[in-house]
Image (cartoon, coloured by chain):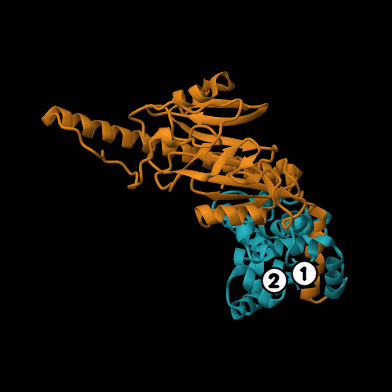
Amino acid sequence: MTRRDVAARLRAQPGAARPSAGETFDELFLRERQAMVRVAYLIAGSTAVAEEVTHDAFVTVYERWDRLDQPGAYLRRCVVNGAMRATRRRRHGERLEAADPPPEAVRPAHDHTLDAVHRLAPRARSLVVLRYYAQLTVQEIADVLQIPPGTVKSGLHRALAELREVLV
Amino acid sequence: MLDLEDRLTADLATAAQAADPHPPNRQAVAATVARRRHRRRVRATVLAVAASVIVAAGAVAALGAVRDDDHTVIEQPTTTVPPTTEVPVTTSSTSSTTSSTTTPPAISGNPLRVPVSENLVLRADGIGPFDFGAPQDEVMAGIVAELGEPRSRYQGGGPSQNCEPAAEEVAWIGLFLRFEGPDPGSLRLTGWSAGYGNAQAPRTFRMQDGPALGEPVPVWQAAYGSALLVEPSPGPPVGYQSLTLNLDGVTLDGSAGPDEPVVVNGMTRMTTNCSLGDV
C-alpha cells in the first residue's frame, strides 16, 4: 500500500476529515474521536494513555468551546501535547507497554516500524505521526506544535535519517 | 520495496488499527466536565464563606474595640463592600399584591447594602417584563439596558445535560439567565437565578410584590407564611438554610445564611432540568 493509497483511505474515514467552521461540539467529537485516539496511541505507545489523553483533550475543548476560533486545531494540539507529556513522564520511570515484546519471529512488520518510531524523542515522534499517519502538511504540523515550519522540516529530516538507519 | 515514507504511512496506519484504542465516550466527557465544574463551584463557595467569616470577624472586632475604648459607634465597619446607596427594606414593594403575598413588614436596623432593581422583579413565570419562552434577543436587550453587558456566557446543550439541543447561560454579577432552544439562533428564556452578597453587585432583586434578596428570613416568612419552607442545608458549609417557596403551585428554590442576621441570599426558578453548569 502506497502513501497515496493510505492517505486516500484516511480521507474516506469520517475521523480523518478536517474541521469545518460553525460546527457543534458533538459533530467535532464524532468526527475526530477515533482519529485522535489513534494519533495519541502512536505517539504515546499505550492504548490506556491514549484513551486518557484523548478524553482529557475533549474535556478541555468542551470547557473552552465558546472561546475557541479553531476547535479542531486546538483539539489536535491538546492530544499531541498530552501524548508527548505522557511519553516524557514514562521515559523517566514507567515502563513502556511494549517494553516486553513477543519474540521477533511472531511480530508483524508494522510492529518493527512502530518500535523504531517509539525510539525517537517525543517531539520527533510527534512529527512523524502527524506527517505520515495524520497526513498533515508541514504548515499544519507547525500550527499544531506551535513551532516554525522550518523546524518541522528539519525535525522530520532528522527523524527520517534516524529511522532509515534502523528500518532500511 | 516501499520507500521509507510509504512504509511509515502504511505501517503506522496498520499499527493504529491493530491496537484499536477505544475512542472517548461522549457521556464520560460530559460527566468529567460536570465533575470539574462541581469542584470549582464548591471551592468558590468555600472561599466565599471563608471571606465572609473573615470580614464579619473583622467587623465584630472593630466594633468591640470601639465600644470597649470610648463607647462610640462607628458608622462604617471595615468591610470589602463598596460604598452603595442604602435602601430600607420597607420600600421594596409598591405595586399591587397578589392573592398569595402580602407586603413584608419593616424590620429596622437591616438596611440592604445596595439598591433594589424595580424593573427586573423576580417572578415564578419569568423576570421583569419577560415571561419564560421569550426570545433571547428580546430578553438580552432588556436586561443589558438595565444591568449592562454580561460578565460571562456559557454555551452547551443536548440530552447529556438534560437540555434542549442548544443552551446558553448568561451571567451578570448577582444574576444569571438560562436560554434553551432547538439551535443557537432560536434560544428562549427558560430560567433565572439571582443572588445577593457579592460585594461587587451593583443592585439586588426582589420578588414581584414581595421581599428582596438580602432581606432577613423573617421578612420573607412574614410575606409568604406557610408557602415558604425554611430548612437547614444538609452538610457543609454549615450555617446555610434551604428555602423552598411555593408560589401558586410553582416551586422556587432559595438559600439563606450563614451570617447574622440570616438574610435570603439566593433564589432560583428554572423551568427545565437543564444542567449546563456554572458560569
Q: Is B145 above or below relative to B122?
A: below
Is residue A53 visible in the rendered image? The answer is no
Query: Is residue A147 shown left or right of residue A141?
Result: left
Q: Are marks 1 and 2 in contact (CB under 8 Å)?
A: yes
The residue under label 1 is which amino acid type?
Answer: Leu
Q: Residue at x 61, y 54 (%)?
A: B140
Residue A72's disc is: none
In this rendering, do the residues under marks 1 and 2 share a single chain? Answer: no
- Residue A89, given in percent of the width and then of the height, sits at 56, 53
Q: Colour of chain B?
A: orange
Instruction: Using the numbered discs, state the Cα–Cα distance from disc 1 to disc 2 in whole angstroms.
Output: 9 Å
* Residue at the extreme top: B226
Reading the image, the residue beneath label 2 is A163
Amino acid type of the residue that numbered disc 2 sits on in the rendered structure: Leu
B56 lies left or right of A113: left
**Which hue belongs to chain A?**
cyan
Which of B11 and B27 lies nearest the eye of the viewer? B27
Whether residue B105 is visible: yes
Query: Of the residues tagged 1 and 2, which is closer to the observer?
Result: 1
Left or right of B45, for residue A67: right
Q: Which residue is mark 1?
A: B8
